[in-house]
Amino acid sequence: MANFLDELLGLGEAGLTIGTGAVSGMVGMPYGLYKGMTGGGYGTPAGVQQAQQEAEAFMQRNTYQPRTEAGQGIVEFLGDAMTASKLPPVMPEAMALSSIPVGASAARMAENAAAPRQLGSQAGAIRFPGAGKFDPRFDPRVKEQPSLVSLKTDVTESGINVPRVSLADFEGRPFITTMSDRTNVGLLNQINDVNLNRPVNMQGGQGFMFENPGMVWASAKGPSKQILNEAEIIKQVTGQNPLYIPWRMAPTGGDFASMTGESMLSYADTAMSKSNKKKLDKMIKTYIPDWAGVSSEKAPEQFRSAPDKVRKALKNEMDVNFRDAGGLGIGQARLSVSDPAQLASRDAGIMNVGEVFANQPLIPNSGHVAYPTGVPGQGLGQLKEDLSIFQLMPNVVQARGIPDALNPRATDIRALQMKPYAGVITEGLLKSLGY
């Protein structure tokens, strides 16, 4: 009977060790990293070693140690099993945290805010997005270039004044970053000489954080929860809400959102002949059997509700088979719904800065038709500097062996798409960037 009780007590102790170890591990890893990066060894092997030692010491101090022989044996067995399975001792996500924050410069932010950027006027603004320089990947086909260069649009924007800020304004602040497409915010009323029967509501994109009070971002529930979870851990360690600094995707990144396809459908409804619209509807019915028709008020919602694979196929069909039948080519559609400030901007570049409200719940209905779940927070401003997100993460650059942080390789950018990354805008980082 005594042996059985010993084993039972040992199981209880092992469970206590695992439970306290999980909690201390979640807090201890970023704690160790932040201690290491503020110990004078930032960016060096000595700094990494110190971070690991601090994390291990924290976890040892805050993890229950079994006192019975049975408990010690069970924990030792579990440890051997984890070693055999080659599970990583430190979460890769935690390696992104790099320093303890200090206060931001409110004076610098106030100075920059005196010269805000206005997103747009209340009245429609005729623009020629293709007349200037734009990334050729919007549509690389040579024969389509004249139609891109001559493109003009009429967009009604909110007229929100966005403060201009500098990265130096945020010295000491932790940040989270994920990807963002280049789509614009506002109401697309006209493409070329076609006044759309159904103007297209463009929701962004980078500008989302300034157009939606109480939200800094929107995505599917899973990615939004990842961002908020990271924010809660960072605030637990640093005592601050993290910044949110999204990085820029390629020109085709906005194709997932429905705006590109909606602009093609609205243009077709307005500009196509009845016979060509009939052909278009017949084609769409092969993908959406209950399609109500391109001129139906139900058309936008039916398109939005279709799976991404179907939306992609429909955009390709409209581009290949109907752009010369009164329709809109996909390159023109992409340019029409893109932010003019980002037409020629670098991939993985950063532009807008927001703040995540950690410890607040996710917002179940963001209002964005493609990204339904909102992340609580607010927009803070638009950067004056043209920077790459990799310049803010020297540890990632070093770990991946990136030759030029301003011009990362496609494989480096793809790796960044997998999850949120985090870091801290330290004094040393700012000095390395010339501030």
Image (cartoon, rainbow, N blue to C red):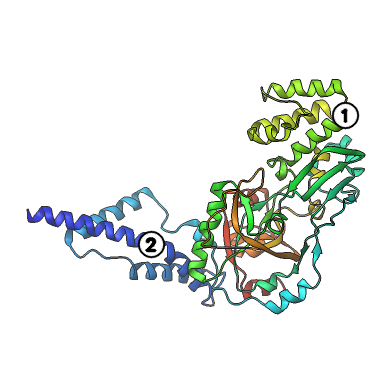
Q: Nearer the viewer, residue 193 or 30?
A: 193
- The residue depicted at 71 percent of the width and 40 percent of the height is 258
The three-letter code of the residue at mark 1 reads: Gly
| Mark pair 2, 1: CA separation | 61 Å
Of pointers 2 and 1, the one earlier in the residue sequence: 2
Count of all numbered marks drawn on residues in the image? 2
The three-letter code of the residue at mark 2 reads: Val
Seen as rendered, the residue at the extreme left is 1
Q: Nearer the viewer, residue 384 or 427?
A: 384
Q: Is residue 156 left or right of residue 404?
A: right
Q: Which residue is mark 2?
A: 23
Residue 196 at x, y percent in the picture:
85, 38
Q: Is residue 43 at all visible to an observer of this figure?
A: yes
Q: Which residue is mark 1?
A: 326
Q: Is residue 272 left or right of residue 346?
A: right
Residue 127 at x, y percent in the picture:
89, 50
Q: Secondary structure at mark 2?
A: helix
Q: Which marked residue is nearer to the observer: mark 2 or mark 1?
A: 1
